[in-house]
Every structure is written in structure tokens, then in C-alpha cells.
Amino acid sequence: MKKAIKQINIVRKEIDDTHYYWVNGEFFPGVTRILDEAAPMPYALKQYFLRSTPESAEKKLQITGDFGSLIHATIERLLLGEEINLEEEFPATKAKKHLCSFVAWFDDFKPDVDTIQTEHTIASLTHKYAGTLDLACRKNGEFWIIDFKTGSGIYHNHELQIAAYKQAYEEMYGVKVDHTAIMRTGSRHKKGFEFKEIKRSFKHFKAVYDSYLNLHDGKIPEPPKINVYPEKLQIIKKLKAIKGGEEK
């Protein structure tokens, strides 16, 4: 694991199935949150919403999000060296297709396994945002940051996302990231995946980030309230066993 050149303590919290970040005790918006609010909606997604009722669209997004999270979590396990039993854990063909296409890509790409960082939280102290990158690694001496997608395409906001990750990673570690790319699993391409190197500049993400701030009166919005729940719940004490009409 690389050591950050700056003292950065990143805490990621899950609130309502969304990542939120505190960096050195200060709330930073996540890259995907910024893009969800301020980036232009991809044309294909816009058309989908126009053809759907709000209820059906929300249900579809939930299903898609759950599937994407499952595939991402399993890819992390594979990158950490764990063996996955497809038949026991993933009886559905769709999941098998995506996971096998990831393995095919990994065998084709051949990163230096000793340099792999996966599901790694990063932050930009300069620009005050944070995120979690899928994969950072070296290949043939050059440094790559790669984001994994499970959807139907690679869109403009995906390219902005990885440009933001590149900027934050270079700030944190003082290294030059040579390449950024997006790998889409389960595609209709001959090898079963789509791999695209991204040349998007950070200035394009910064323009969207500025729009995000403008939506919030020029400042980072307050973080969501965090509800604290007890570890256990009970409303009735368990009854003692009764035998022969008497408490035992």
C-alpha cells in the first residue's frame, strides 16, 4: 500500500445506501454525488426516463444499483485473492456473465498484482471532494486507475468521474498517473467486456463541480443527518418455559 504524502484521514459512511465522506473531520462531497446532481444526464438515460413512469424508473434504478454493487463487491473479493464459487453464490446467468468477463479482462490486461489497490478511498484537499476508486495498479511500469461499470454503456459522467479520481490520487501520493480507463463487464463485445482508455481532463470535472457548488449557494452543502440506532431491540422479555401449569 502506498503511503500518502499528506496526512489524510478519510472516513466513509453509508447512509441510505449512499457513500458520504469526512476528510480530516470535514465533510467532503463524493464524486458520484457531485456528478449525479450537476452533470448533464446521458441521452440514453434521459430517453429511458421519458418513456417510464417515476415508479418504474425508480424500481429499475434500484435493481440496477443493487446488481452493480454486488458485482463490484465480488470483483473486490477476486482482486484480494479470494476464490468465488459461481454455482453456489451466483446461480443467475447474468451475474456469471459479468464476473467471467471481468476475469477475462484481468487475464488479458495482466496488471502487476503486487501493486493492486482496490476499493480505495481518496480525497482532494485542494478541491474538497472524495471518492472510492475501483482499481489502482501498475502495468509494465506505468500507473493506471481503472473504474468498473456494469451498465449498458460508458457515458460522459463516467469519464468525468475517473478524471476526478486521477487528480485526487496524484495529490495524495505525489505520483503521476499515466493512464485512466473504464472497464465495462458483461458487454456484447467479442471478449465479453469493453475497455476504454479515458483522456478526459480534470478541468471538465471541475466545471461540473463549480456548477454543483452554485446549486448550493457557492458552498459545500451540510452533510445528511446521521441517525444513531441501538445495537439490539426488544419490546417483550422472553417468557420462561411453563411446565405443568407452573413456571420452570
Image: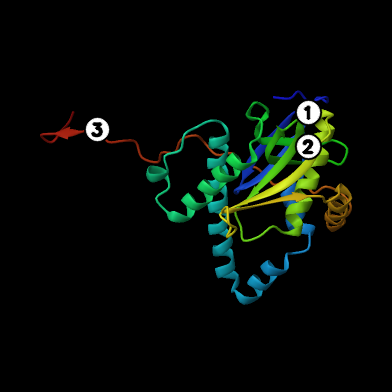
Q: Residue at x 83, y 24 (%)?
A: 5
Mark 3 or 1: the one toward you: 1
Decide: few, some or many residues near mark 3? Use Cα within 10 Å; few <14, some 14-19, many ≥20: few
Say which element carries label 2. Answer: strand
Residue 136 vs 188, above or below: the answer is above
In the image, taking residue 115 as reference, residue 208 lies left or right, namely: right
Callout 1 amino acid: Ile
Q: Earlier in the sequence, mark 2 or mark 3?
A: 2
- Which color scheme is applied? rainbow
Whether residue 230 sits left or right of residue 33 in the image: it is left
- Does the residue at mark 1 contact the one at mark 2 (Cβ under 8 Å)? yes
Check disc 3 and report its element: helix, strand or loop: loop
Residue 30 seen: no
How many labels, in total? 3
Q: Quadrant of the C terminus?
A: top left
Judge the density around disc 1: few (<14), some (14-19), many (≥20) Cα neighbours within 10 Å: some
Look at the image and tell me whether residue 83 can be seen: yes
Is label 2 or label 3 in front?
Answer: 2
Identify the residue at the far left of this view.
244
Q: Estimate how packed mark 2 is, as few (under 14), some (14 to 19) or many (20 or more) residues with alpha carbons within 10 Å.
A: many
Q: Nearer the viewer, residue 225 or 12?
A: 12
Per the model, the C-alpha gap separating discs 1 and 2 is 8 Å
Q: Are marks 2 and 3 in contact (CB under 8 Å)?
A: no
Determine the residue positioned at 87% across, 56% down.
214
Q: Which residue is mark 2?
A: 123
Q: Which residue is mark 3?
A: 240
**Label 3 to label 1, Cα distance in Å?**
53 Å
In this view, the residue farthest toward the bottom is 51
Vertical order, 220 against 7 (above or below): below
